């Protein structure tokens, strides 16, 4: 069995402690911009309007009117920390929604995209 000196062990333990105390990658701020909503269900409603053919601005206005407050809006480039990344299946459409904590306000907001229908208009034999 090889002999490891006490200074080497101390150096190894110090480097392990430093690595484990380093911030996680998801804690690093990223630069984001685009349409964000205040809650996940509001973001899904926004994406549903887009999937129906509404422009982003119209979709945001419709959701804001239904909710009764300014919840969906366009954000200029800002620093935010990614928090959650979820996939939602609703009415046959697949939505990928993400939440970010905006700095320095520390407010969580949601953004996302939709991928299309999981329902085929073709029968199984036609595929």
Image (cartoon, grey):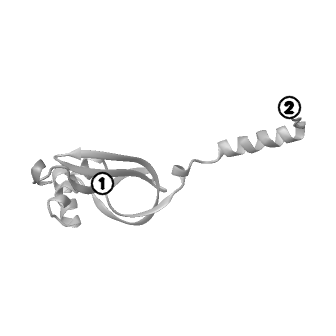
Number of the front mark, 1 or 2: 2
Question: For the C terminus, which image quadrant?
Answer: bottom left
Q: Residue furthest front?
A: 125
Query: Residue tagged by mark 1?
Result: 37
* Residue furthest to the top: 1
Residue 1: mark = 2
Front residue (pair 115, 99): 115
Q: Rounded to the nearest whole Å, what is the CA distance between mark 1 and mark 2?
A: 60 Å
Residue in view at x 68 percent, y 45 percent: 19
Earlier in the chain: of badge 1 and badge 2, it is: 2
Residue 54, image quadrant: bottom left
Left or right position of 40 against 100: left
120 above or below 9?
below
Mark 2 and mark 1 in contact (Cβ < 8 Å)? no
Estimate the x, y position of residue 66 in percent, counting from the top left: 16, 51
Percent x, y of residue 51: 18, 59
- Tag 2, which secondary structure? loop
Query: At 51% from the left edge and 57% from the top edge, which residue is drawn?
Result: 29
What element does badge 1 sit on?
loop
32 w.r.t. 81: above or below: below
Q: Quadrant of the N terminus?
A: top right
Residue 8 numbered tag: none
Q: Is residue 106 visible?
A: no
**Residue drawn 30% across the image and 47% down it:** 39
Drawn side of residue 1 relative to residue 121, left or right: right
Q: Position of residue 67 (x, y in %)?
A: 20, 50
Counting other residues with Cα less than 10 Å from the Cα at mark 2, is it few (<14), some (14-19), or many (20 or more)? few
The percent position of residue 56, horizontal first and vertical second, equals: 23, 65
């Amino acid at each position: 069995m090889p002999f490891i000196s006490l200074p080497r062990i101390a150096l190894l333990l110090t480097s392990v402690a430093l690595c484990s105390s380093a911030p996680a990658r998801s804690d690093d701020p990223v630069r984001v911009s685009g349409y964000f909503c205040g809650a996940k269900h509001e973001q899904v409603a926004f994406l549903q309007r887009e999937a129906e053919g509404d422009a982003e601005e119209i979709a945001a206005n419709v959701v804001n009117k239904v909710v009764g407050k300014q919840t969906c809006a366009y954000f200029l480039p800002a620093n935010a920390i990614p928090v959650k990344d979820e996939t939602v299946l609703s009415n046959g459409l697949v939505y990928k929604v993400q939440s970010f904590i905006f700095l320095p306000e520390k407010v969580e907001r949601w953004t996302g995209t939709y991928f299309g229908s999981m329902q085929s208009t073709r029968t199984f034999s036609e595929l």
